[in-house]
Amino acid sequence: MKNFILKSINITLILIIIFAPLRFDFFYIIKYINADFWSDNYLEITEDTTWNSDTDLSDYGEVEITNNATLTIEPGSQLVIPNITIFEGKIVAQSTIDNKITLKSKEINLEEIAQELNIQNIDDYDRECFDGGPTITFDTDLSMYNQPSIFKFVQFKNMGSYIDDNMNCPELGTIASKNQKQRIFNTAFAVDGLKRPAVKINSGKVEMENVIFESNEYTDIDVNIELEEDYSQDSYLHIKNSNFQNNEQNTAMLSTVGHYDYDAEDECYDSCYDNCDSQLCIVGCEEQCRIQNNNFFEPDNTKVVLQ
Protein backbone atom coordinates (compact mmCIF):
# COMPACT_ATOMS: atom_id res chain seq x y z
CA MET A 1 0.00 0.00 0.00
CA LYS A 2 2.82 2.37 0.92
CA ASN A 3 4.59 1.77 -2.40
CA PHE A 4 1.34 2.35 -4.27
CA ILE A 5 0.86 5.72 -2.53
CA LEU A 6 4.43 6.78 -3.30
CA LYS A 7 4.05 5.79 -6.96
CA SER A 8 0.78 7.73 -7.15
CA ILE A 9 2.43 10.82 -5.70
CA ASN A 10 5.32 10.56 -8.16
CA ILE A 11 2.97 10.18 -11.12
CA THR A 12 0.93 13.18 -9.94
CA LEU A 13 4.05 15.34 -9.63
CA ILE A 14 5.21 14.33 -13.10
CA LEU A 15 1.82 15.24 -14.59
CA ILE A 16 1.86 18.60 -12.82
CA ILE A 17 5.33 19.35 -14.16
CA ILE A 18 4.36 18.33 -17.69
CA PHE A 19 1.07 20.18 -17.93
CA ALA A 20 1.36 23.11 -15.54
CA PRO A 21 1.54 26.41 -17.48
CA LEU A 22 4.22 27.81 -15.16
CA ARG A 23 6.57 24.88 -15.41
CA PHE A 24 9.22 26.83 -17.31
CA ASP A 25 9.39 29.50 -14.63
CA PHE A 26 9.60 26.80 -11.96
CA PHE A 27 12.55 25.13 -13.60
CA TYR A 28 14.07 28.47 -14.39
CA ILE A 29 14.28 29.26 -10.68
CA ILE A 30 15.81 25.84 -10.02
CA LYS A 31 18.35 26.72 -12.68
CA TYR A 32 19.86 29.33 -10.42
CA ILE A 33 19.63 27.25 -7.28
CA ASN A 34 21.35 24.30 -8.93
CA ALA A 35 23.28 25.84 -11.81
CA ASP A 36 24.90 22.64 -13.04
CA PHE A 37 21.43 21.29 -13.91
CA TRP A 38 21.35 23.73 -16.83
CA SER A 39 24.59 23.59 -18.78
CA ASP A 40 23.64 26.53 -21.02
CA ASN A 41 24.02 28.92 -18.09
CA TYR A 42 26.81 27.14 -16.26
CA LEU A 43 30.46 26.72 -17.17
CA GLU A 44 32.66 24.28 -15.27
CA ILE A 45 36.39 24.68 -15.85
CA THR A 46 38.01 21.30 -15.26
CA GLU A 47 41.28 21.80 -17.15
CA ASP A 48 43.78 24.63 -17.60
CA THR A 49 42.04 27.46 -19.46
CA THR A 50 43.06 30.89 -20.74
CA TRP A 51 40.83 33.95 -21.09
CA ASN A 52 41.57 37.19 -22.95
CA SER A 53 39.66 40.21 -24.22
CA ASP A 54 38.06 38.10 -26.95
CA THR A 55 36.57 35.64 -24.47
CA ASP A 56 32.77 35.91 -24.57
CA LEU A 57 31.14 34.87 -21.30
CA SER A 58 27.74 36.42 -21.94
CA ASP A 59 25.98 33.04 -22.13
CA TYR A 60 26.98 32.09 -18.59
CA GLY A 61 25.62 33.16 -15.23
CA GLU A 62 28.03 31.02 -13.23
CA VAL A 63 31.58 29.73 -13.71
CA GLU A 64 33.12 27.13 -11.41
CA ILE A 65 36.76 26.05 -11.28
CA THR A 66 37.30 22.42 -10.23
CA ASN A 67 39.60 19.46 -10.77
CA ASN A 68 42.75 21.47 -9.86
CA ALA A 69 42.40 23.58 -13.00
CA THR A 70 44.18 26.91 -13.51
CA LEU A 71 42.32 29.80 -15.10
CA THR A 72 44.86 32.18 -16.65
CA ILE A 73 43.76 35.68 -17.64
CA GLU A 74 46.09 37.23 -20.19
CA PRO A 75 47.73 40.64 -19.58
CA GLY A 76 45.60 43.58 -20.66
CA SER A 77 42.38 41.56 -20.84
CA GLN A 78 39.15 43.55 -20.54
CA LEU A 79 36.50 41.10 -19.44
CA VAL A 80 32.82 41.25 -18.55
CA ILE A 81 32.55 38.31 -16.17
CA PRO A 82 29.76 36.31 -14.51
CA ASN A 83 29.94 34.97 -10.97
CA ILE A 84 33.07 32.82 -10.53
CA THR A 85 33.61 30.27 -7.75
CA ILE A 86 36.92 28.51 -7.15
CA PHE A 87 36.47 25.09 -5.53
CA GLU A 88 39.59 23.22 -6.64
CA GLY A 89 42.07 25.29 -8.62
CA LYS A 90 43.26 28.85 -8.96
CA ILE A 91 43.13 32.04 -10.99
CA VAL A 92 46.33 33.59 -12.29
CA ALA A 93 45.80 37.16 -13.54
CA GLN A 94 49.13 38.94 -13.86
CA SER A 95 49.79 42.03 -15.92
CA THR A 96 51.74 45.30 -15.84
CA ILE A 97 51.05 48.88 -14.77
CA ASP A 98 50.62 50.03 -18.39
CA ASN A 99 48.45 47.09 -19.44
CA LYS A 100 46.10 46.33 -16.56
CA ILE A 101 43.55 43.53 -16.57
CA THR A 102 39.99 44.72 -15.92
CA LEU A 103 37.25 42.45 -14.56
CA LYS A 104 33.86 44.13 -14.55
CA SER A 105 30.11 43.75 -14.80
CA LYS A 106 27.98 44.29 -17.85
CA GLU A 107 26.83 47.87 -18.37
CA ILE A 108 23.09 48.12 -17.99
CA ASN A 109 20.70 49.71 -20.44
CA LEU A 110 17.50 50.71 -18.66
CA GLU A 111 15.54 51.04 -21.90
CA GLU A 112 16.38 47.47 -22.86
CA ILE A 113 15.49 46.25 -19.37
CA ALA A 114 12.17 48.07 -19.43
CA GLN A 115 11.28 46.42 -22.73
CA GLU A 116 12.42 42.99 -21.61
CA LEU A 117 10.53 43.14 -18.31
CA ASN A 118 7.46 44.86 -19.76
CA ILE A 119 7.86 47.73 -17.30
CA GLN A 120 6.02 50.84 -18.42
CA ASN A 121 7.74 53.30 -16.10
CA ILE A 122 11.12 51.91 -15.16
CA ASP A 123 12.00 55.23 -13.54
CA ASP A 124 9.59 54.22 -10.75
CA TYR A 125 12.22 51.72 -9.57
CA ASP A 126 15.68 52.32 -8.16
CA ARG A 127 18.49 51.77 -10.63
CA GLU A 128 20.26 49.50 -8.12
CA CYS A 129 17.51 46.91 -8.64
CA PHE A 130 19.02 46.09 -12.03
CA ASP A 131 22.64 47.01 -11.44
CA GLY A 132 23.99 43.96 -9.63
CA GLY A 133 27.41 42.73 -10.72
CA PRO A 134 29.40 39.52 -10.35
CA THR A 135 31.27 38.12 -7.35
CA ILE A 136 34.47 36.06 -7.37
CA THR A 137 34.14 33.54 -4.53
CA PHE A 138 36.91 31.41 -3.09
CA ASP A 139 35.58 28.20 -1.53
CA THR A 140 38.78 26.31 -2.18
CA ASP A 141 39.25 22.91 -0.57
CA LEU A 142 42.87 23.23 0.53
CA SER A 143 43.06 19.53 1.27
CA MET A 144 42.62 19.02 -2.48
CA TYR A 145 44.43 22.07 -3.86
CA ASN A 146 46.92 24.23 -2.00
CA GLN A 147 48.23 26.78 -4.53
CA PRO A 148 47.38 30.50 -4.28
CA SER A 149 45.40 32.53 -6.76
CA ILE A 150 47.39 35.54 -7.93
CA PHE A 151 46.12 38.95 -9.07
CA LYS A 152 48.70 41.53 -10.15
CA PHE A 153 47.78 44.84 -11.80
CA VAL A 154 44.10 43.90 -11.95
CA GLN A 155 41.12 46.23 -11.69
CA PHE A 156 37.84 44.98 -10.17
CA LYS A 157 35.19 47.40 -11.38
CA ASN A 158 31.43 47.76 -10.81
CA MET A 159 31.19 44.33 -9.23
CA GLY A 160 29.00 42.95 -6.46
CA SER A 161 25.47 44.03 -5.57
CA TYR A 162 23.64 45.82 -2.79
CA ILE A 163 19.91 46.03 -2.21
CA ASP A 164 18.24 46.92 1.07
CA ASP A 165 14.64 47.07 2.22
CA ASN A 166 14.42 50.79 1.49
CA MET A 167 14.95 50.33 -2.24
CA ASN A 168 11.99 50.18 -4.56
CA CYS A 169 12.38 47.07 -6.73
CA PRO A 170 9.87 45.02 -8.77
CA GLU A 171 8.47 41.87 -7.17
CA LEU A 172 9.53 38.61 -8.80
CA GLY A 173 5.91 37.50 -8.84
CA THR A 174 5.06 40.25 -11.32
CA ILE A 175 7.71 39.05 -13.77
CA ALA A 176 6.18 36.25 -15.78
CA SER A 177 8.57 34.89 -18.35
CA LYS A 178 11.76 32.88 -18.18
CA ASN A 179 13.78 35.51 -20.05
CA GLN A 180 12.51 38.25 -17.79
CA LYS A 181 13.54 36.39 -14.67
CA GLN A 182 17.00 35.86 -16.14
CA ARG A 183 17.67 39.59 -16.02
CA ILE A 184 16.65 39.77 -12.37
CA PHE A 185 18.31 36.59 -11.13
CA ASN A 186 21.56 37.34 -12.91
CA THR A 187 21.76 40.76 -11.32
CA ALA A 188 20.33 42.13 -8.13
CA PHE A 189 18.09 39.24 -7.15
CA ALA A 190 20.81 36.57 -7.31
CA VAL A 191 20.02 33.54 -5.18
CA ASP A 192 23.19 33.90 -3.12
CA GLY A 193 22.07 37.17 -1.61
CA LEU A 194 21.26 40.83 -2.13
CA LYS A 195 24.52 42.04 -0.58
CA ARG A 196 27.45 40.56 -2.45
CA PRO A 197 31.06 41.80 -2.47
CA ALA A 198 33.35 41.98 -5.46
CA VAL A 199 35.55 39.26 -3.92
CA LYS A 200 34.47 36.81 -1.21
CA ILE A 201 36.92 34.48 0.53
CA ASN A 202 35.55 31.58 2.58
CA SER A 203 38.64 29.42 2.19
CA GLY A 204 41.69 29.46 -0.04
CA LYS A 205 44.91 31.36 -0.63
CA VAL A 206 44.74 34.70 -2.43
CA GLU A 207 47.60 37.07 -3.23
CA MET A 208 46.92 40.54 -4.63
CA GLU A 209 49.47 43.15 -5.64
CA ASN A 210 48.88 46.53 -7.29
CA VAL A 211 45.17 45.85 -7.72
CA ILE A 212 42.42 48.46 -7.86
CA PHE A 213 38.88 48.06 -6.54
CA GLU A 214 36.71 50.72 -8.13
CA SER A 215 33.02 51.63 -7.83
CA ASN A 216 31.85 48.29 -6.48
CA GLU A 217 28.31 48.04 -5.14
CA TYR A 218 28.95 46.41 -1.76
CA THR A 219 32.17 45.91 0.19
CA ASP A 220 35.15 45.28 -2.09
CA ILE A 221 36.35 42.21 -0.18
CA ASP A 222 34.52 40.01 2.33
CA VAL A 223 36.72 37.51 4.20
CA ASN A 224 34.90 34.97 6.38
CA ILE A 225 37.16 32.06 7.30
CA GLU A 226 36.60 29.52 10.07
CA LEU A 227 40.05 28.09 10.66
CA GLU A 228 38.94 25.03 12.60
CA GLU A 229 37.82 23.43 9.34
CA ASP A 230 40.53 21.21 7.84
CA TYR A 231 39.94 22.58 4.36
CA SER A 232 40.44 26.21 5.38
CA GLN A 233 43.02 26.34 8.17
CA ASP A 234 45.83 27.36 5.78
CA SER A 235 43.73 30.07 4.12
CA TYR A 236 45.03 33.60 3.80
CA LEU A 237 44.67 36.89 1.93
CA HIS A 238 47.74 39.02 1.23
CA ILE A 239 47.26 42.46 -0.36
CA LYS A 240 50.14 44.71 -1.32
CA ASN A 241 50.25 48.25 -2.80
CA SER A 242 46.57 48.25 -3.72
CA ASN A 243 43.81 50.89 -3.86
CA PHE A 244 40.14 50.91 -2.90
CA GLN A 245 38.18 53.65 -4.69
CA ASN A 246 34.62 54.98 -4.81
CA ASN A 247 32.96 52.03 -3.11
CA GLU A 248 29.20 52.64 -3.10
CA GLN A 249 28.95 51.67 0.60
CA ASN A 250 32.29 53.27 1.59
CA THR A 251 33.50 49.86 2.76
CA ALA A 252 36.75 48.38 1.50
CA MET A 253 36.79 45.15 3.50
CA LEU A 254 34.87 43.03 5.98
CA SER A 255 36.97 40.41 7.73
CA THR A 256 36.04 37.66 10.17
CA VAL A 257 38.86 35.14 10.50
CA GLY A 258 39.55 32.84 13.41
CA HIS A 259 38.56 29.81 15.44
CA TYR A 260 35.00 29.33 16.65
CA ASP A 261 34.71 27.21 19.77
CA TYR A 262 31.57 25.16 19.14
CA ASP A 263 32.21 23.07 22.26
CA ALA A 264 32.07 26.18 24.43
CA GLU A 265 28.84 27.20 22.73
CA ASP A 266 27.31 23.76 23.37
CA GLU A 267 28.40 23.90 27.01
CA CYS A 268 26.69 27.27 27.37
CA TYR A 269 23.38 25.89 26.11
CA ASP A 270 23.65 22.60 28.04
CA SER A 271 24.51 24.31 31.31
CA CYS A 272 21.63 26.73 30.96
CA TYR A 273 19.09 24.12 29.81
CA ASP A 274 19.91 21.86 32.77
CA ASN A 275 18.53 24.50 35.09
CA CYS A 276 15.42 25.24 33.04
CA ASP A 277 11.89 24.17 33.90
CA SER A 278 9.89 26.27 31.44
CA GLN A 279 9.78 27.29 27.79
CA LEU A 280 10.44 30.89 28.83
CA CYS A 281 13.67 29.81 30.48
CA ILE A 282 14.76 27.97 27.32
CA VAL A 283 14.18 31.11 25.26
CA GLY A 284 16.23 33.03 27.80
CA CYS A 285 19.09 30.53 27.46
CA GLU A 286 19.14 30.94 23.72
CA GLU A 287 19.30 34.71 24.06
CA GLN A 288 21.98 34.51 26.73
CA CYS A 289 24.24 32.22 24.68
CA ARG A 290 23.62 34.24 21.53
CA ILE A 291 24.87 37.35 23.33
CA GLN A 292 27.99 35.45 24.32
CA ASN A 293 28.77 34.41 20.73
CA ASN A 294 31.74 36.77 20.55
CA ASN A 295 33.27 34.99 23.53
CA PHE A 296 33.28 31.75 21.56
CA PHE A 297 35.27 33.25 18.70
CA GLU A 298 39.04 33.66 18.81
CA PRO A 299 40.21 35.94 15.98
CA ASP A 300 43.37 35.28 14.01
CA ASN A 301 44.97 38.48 12.74
CA THR A 302 47.76 36.75 10.81
CA LYS A 303 45.67 35.51 7.89
CA VAL A 304 44.71 38.85 6.33
CA VAL A 305 47.77 40.99 5.65
CA LEU A 306 47.67 44.46 4.02
CA GLN A 307 50.96 46.09 3.04
Image (cartoon, grey):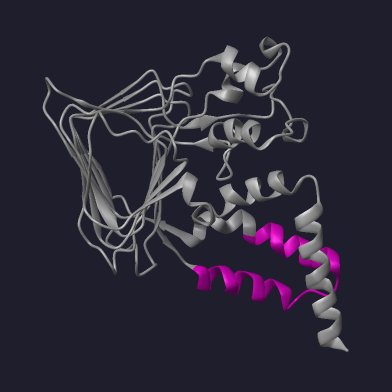
Q: Residue 64 at x, y = what percent?
A: 38, 51
Q: Is residue 11 above or below residue 92?
A: below
Asked if residue 267 lies in the magenta stretch, the reply is yes
Q: Is residue 57 above or below residue 129?
A: below
Q: Residue 82 at x, y = what percent?
A: 42, 37
Q: Residue 216 at x, y = what percent?
A: 42, 25
Left or right of 200 in this view: 109: right
Residue at the location (34% across, 66% down)? 231
Residue at the location (25% across, 57% down)? 47
Q: Is residue 206 above or below residue 190?
A: below
Label tally = 0
Q: Where does the C terminus fall, quadrant-wise?
A: top left
Query: Within the image, what quadrant is residue 54 found in?
Result: top left
Left or right of 112 in this view: 248: left
Q: Is residue 59 above or below residue 268?
A: above
Left or right of 179 in this view: 101: left
Q: Nearer the viewer, residue 140 or 36?
A: 36
Asked if residue 92 lies in the magenta stretch, the reply is no
Q: Residue 90 at x, y = what percent?
A: 25, 52
Q: Nearer the viewer, residue 200 or 282?
A: 200
Asked whether the viewer can see residue 307, the reply is no
Asked whether the viewer can see residue 140, the reply is yes
Residue at the location (59% across, 72% down)? 266
Magenta stretch bounds = 262-289
Characterize the magenta stretch by its predominant secondary structure. helix
Q: Where does the N terminus fall, quadrant-wise?
A: bottom right
Left or right of 149 in this view: 186: right
Q: Residue placed farthest to the bottom in the image?
A: 1
